[in-house]
Image (spheres, grey):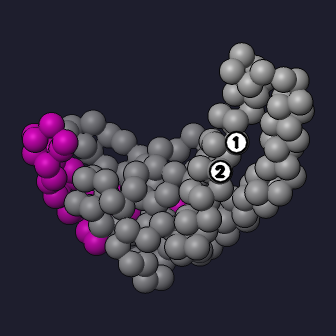
Amino acid sequence: MATTKGTPWLTQEAYDRLKDELDYISGPYRQEIVDRIEAARDEGDLKENAGYHAAREEQSKNEGRIQELKALLENAEVGESAADDGIVKPGMLVECKLAGNSMKFVLGSREIAEVSDVEVYSVASPLGSAIEGHKAGDTVSYKAPNGKDIEVELISVVPYTG
């Protein structure tokens, strides 16, 4: 699996779930919002019509989510699981010691773990970009947003199975 740095990685299940969400919010749900806007518009004065303003705000949020999902699904690399070669890359469950604290997370898109409690870090994050390409046993450091250097000791790197 050769992902390009910064390319979001999704499991097939996450891709399917997001595709279903996109189909719903760009179809029936979008029409439901339009119907609510028209019904509220028929009530008269739009300046003091809370239902109209709420529906317009919901429409704006929905359109933003549609664009976000379209971009994600167009650019995502979809795979069952990352190769079990012990190298940190999207789709891997990483166990590490970060500044002395143990933690586990998946490297990839937050959408892959939407239905579980596991934390997800993006490859584009300072932590993600510092550890990508390294393997268990490696110690790397990165500069945190506050300017401090933070040391990361990679304990284990295995494919995330969801």
Is 144 part of what is drawn in magenta? Answer: yes
Query: Which of the pair 64/12 is nearer the observer?
Result: 64
Answer few, some or many: residues within 10 Å of disc 2's Cα (few below 14, many 20 plus, some between 14 and 19): some
> Does 43 sit above or below residue 101?
above
The quadrant the C terminus occupies is: bottom right
Query: Which of the pair 46/150 is nearer the observer?
Result: 46
- Residue 61 pos. (x, y %): 63, 42
**Mark sitting on residue 118:** none
The magenta segment is: 133-162
Q: Is residue 159 left or right of residue 123?
A: right
Query: Which of the pair 50/3 is nearer the observer?
Result: 50
Residue appearing at x 30%, y 66% in the figure: 132
Identity, as a three-letter code, of the amino acid under mark 1: Gln
Q: Is residue 156 left or right of residue 57?
A: left
Q: Which residue is mark 2?
A: 63
Q: Which residue is mark 1?
A: 59
- Residue 13 pos. (x, y %): 70, 63
Q: Secondary structure at mark 2?
A: helix
Q: In this orientation, does residue 83 appear?
A: yes
Residue appearing at x 21%, y 50% in the figure: 152
Residue appearing at x 46%, y 49% in the figure: 120
The answer to the question of whether label 1 and label 2 lie on touching residues, with beta carbons closer than 8 A, is: yes
Which quadrant of the structure image shows residue 73? bottom right
